[in-house]
Amino acid sequence: MPVRRADVIDAAMELLDKSGLDQLSTRRIADRLGVRVGAIYWHVKDKDELLAELADRVVGSCLDGVPVPDGGAEPPTDPPSAPVADPAARLTAAAHAVRDAMLAHPDGAALVAGHAVPGPNSLVLADRLCGIAREAGLPLPLAAVAGDTLLSYVTGFVLQEQRRGDPLHHHPNTSVPAPDFAPDRLPHLAAALAEGLPDDDTAFAAGIDLLVTAVTSRARPRR
């Protein structure tokens, strides 16, 4: 049976989930599908295009959890003419949905971060984040920055989160000295360490709360 483009993307995603981004190759995809490598290039011109497809699929998997701005297909007034139900909660829900989508795949954040040209799902996500920020009362230019900042924070957080949890990137035998958190040199870090560092879920939620609070604090007064 002929291999379809969707088959190539599916096989690539399965390999990503099994082995991670570093082990993903067109040859391994071809082996998984039982075809020659040349058959892969009937559907994607190169590995970069394949990775872009995978990145957009990861982003697409979060869209059900990202609220659609109440303005729908029509651009909202700037600022909105009437209050919108809790845009802060919508931004928070969107951030958690994006994180969950990236965490669902090994190197999910690295995959998404590695492609500067956004795919269709990435554009939808950016549009929704901008729209929710506008509903919060931000003017259009600042709303676009707010959406991008939120997405950048989520991606950066998950990049570190997945790197810490990836044994391929851990080198326990290397002689890297532990940081010296002596209170006389690093009083604030030493105090934070003494109190106990939060787990990833708690730290992420706190960071998103700070960002969303900052976004909503810049809202224009509604007319």
Image (tube, rainbow, N blue to C red):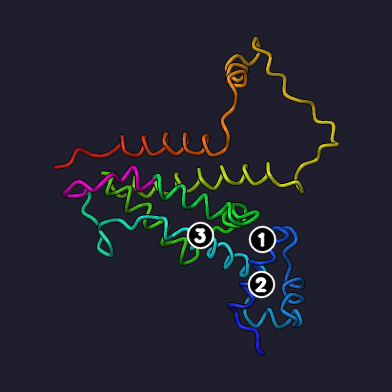
Question: Residue 99 at what x, y percent from top left?
Answer: 52, 49
- Using the rendered view, name the quadrant where residue 3 is placed: bottom right
Could you tell whether 66 is left or right of 190 in the image?
left
- Mark 2, residue position: 11
Q: Amino acid at mark 2?
A: Ala
Q: Which mark is residue 59?
A: 3
Task: Identify the residue at image location x=43%, y=60%.
Answer: 63
Image coordinates of residue 72 in percent, x first then y, are 27, 62
The answer to if 61 sits in the magenta stretch is: no
SS for callout 2: helix
Extreme-left residue of the structure = 223
Residue at figure coordinates x 70%, y 65% from the top left? 15
For the point 62% across and 43% down, which residue is it?
Answer: 161
Give the residues in magenta: 79-91
The residue that mark 1 highlights is: 17
User: Disc 3 vs disc 1: which is toward the camera?
Assistant: 1
> Which quarter shows the C terminus?
top left
CB under 8 Å between discs 2 and 3: no
Q: CA distance from mark 3 to mark 1?
A: 15 Å
Considering the whole magenta stretch, tell me its main secondary structure: loop
Spatial distance from mark 2 to mark 3, Cα to Cα?
18 Å
Q: Residues within 10 Å of mark 2 (few under 14, many from 20)?
A: some
